[in-house]
């Protein structure tokens, strides 16, 4: 299905691929036939999307990103330029491991910074923020700000993408509140878990 999809003449969309309305597919993009993609997504120059890939609505994938098999991106995910997904934990050129892919899940609203790497088998939580160049090799909690190699939690982010005035974690039983400076939304940190106050 390619109704109401903007395709650059150099883009390749294999038969069977499903793209929701309003998607924009730019220069030298290749989308495989098994891909399932929601509405309003954008694919920058040189993006590749594999067959066993599920992408939600309003996902932005910047230039030179390959979304390999076994990756799921929920709604509103941002993939920065040249960031990397993997799907084999212990690759060897001479050993076929296509039956051993580890699934990667990026939850709604998460940001994956430029040149970061998401090692397969990881889950990136809702509205988490992975800093540029970070290497994520384990799960990232919702709203967490992580950076470094390997990535570690250095703070917390609001849904709006603003850093919150909170420590990376609190002792057991402790809690602290913060407000998003852009929206006024309230958040509460309890131990290692941040929740949105409604």
Image: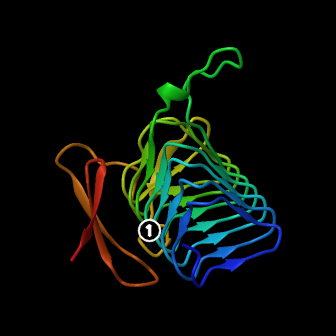
Tell me what residue is drawn at x 56 percent, y 60 percent: 16
Q: Which residue is drawn at 48% across and 26% down?
A: 100
Does dot 1 land on a helix, a strand or a loop? Answer: loop
Place of residue 77 in the rendered image (x, y in percent of width and height, measured from the top left): 51, 65
- Choose between 109 and 185: the one closer to the eye: 109
Q: Quadrant of residue 13?
A: bottom right
Residue that mark 1 sits on: 75
Residue 161 in the image, given as x and y percentages of width and height: 50, 71
Relative side of 122 to 17, left or right: left
Count of picture labels: 1
Q: Where is residue 7 in the image (x, y as percent from the top left)?
A: 72, 76
83 relative to 20, above or below: above
Question: In x, y percent, where is residue 65?
Answer: 69, 54
Q: Quadrant of the N terminus?
A: bottom right
Query: Which residue is at a point 35% across and 48% down the rendered structure image?
Result: 169
* Quadrant of the rendering where the C terminus is positioned: bottom left
Farthest residue, direction top:
94
Q: State the scheme by which the image is colored.
A: rainbow
Which image quarter: residue 68? top right
């Amino acid at each position: 299905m390619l109704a109401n999809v903007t395709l650059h003449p150099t883009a390749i969309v294999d038969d069977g691929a499903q793209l929701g309305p309003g998607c924009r597919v730019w220069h030298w993009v290749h989308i495989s036939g098994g891909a399932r993609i929601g509405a309003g997504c954008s694919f920058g120059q040189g993006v590749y999307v594999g067959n066993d890939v599920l992408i939600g609505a309003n996902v932005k994938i910047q230039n030179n990103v390959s979304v390999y098999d076994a990756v799921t991106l929920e709604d509103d995910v941002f993939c920065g330029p040249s960031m990397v997904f993997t799907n084999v934990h212990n690759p060897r050129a001479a050993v076929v491991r296509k039956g051993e892919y580890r699934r990667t899940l990026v939850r709604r609203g998460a940001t994956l910074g430029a040149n970061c790497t998401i090692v397969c088998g990881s889950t990136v939580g809702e509205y988490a923020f992975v800093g540029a160049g970070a290497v994520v090799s384990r799960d990232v909690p919702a709203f967490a700000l992580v950076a470094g190699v390997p990535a570690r939690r250095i703070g917390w982010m609001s849904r709006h993408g603003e850093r919150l005035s909170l420590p990376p974690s609190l002792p057991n039983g402790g809690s602290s509140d913060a407000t998003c400076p852009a929206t006024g939304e309230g958040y509460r940190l309890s131990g290692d878990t941040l929740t949105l106050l409604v």
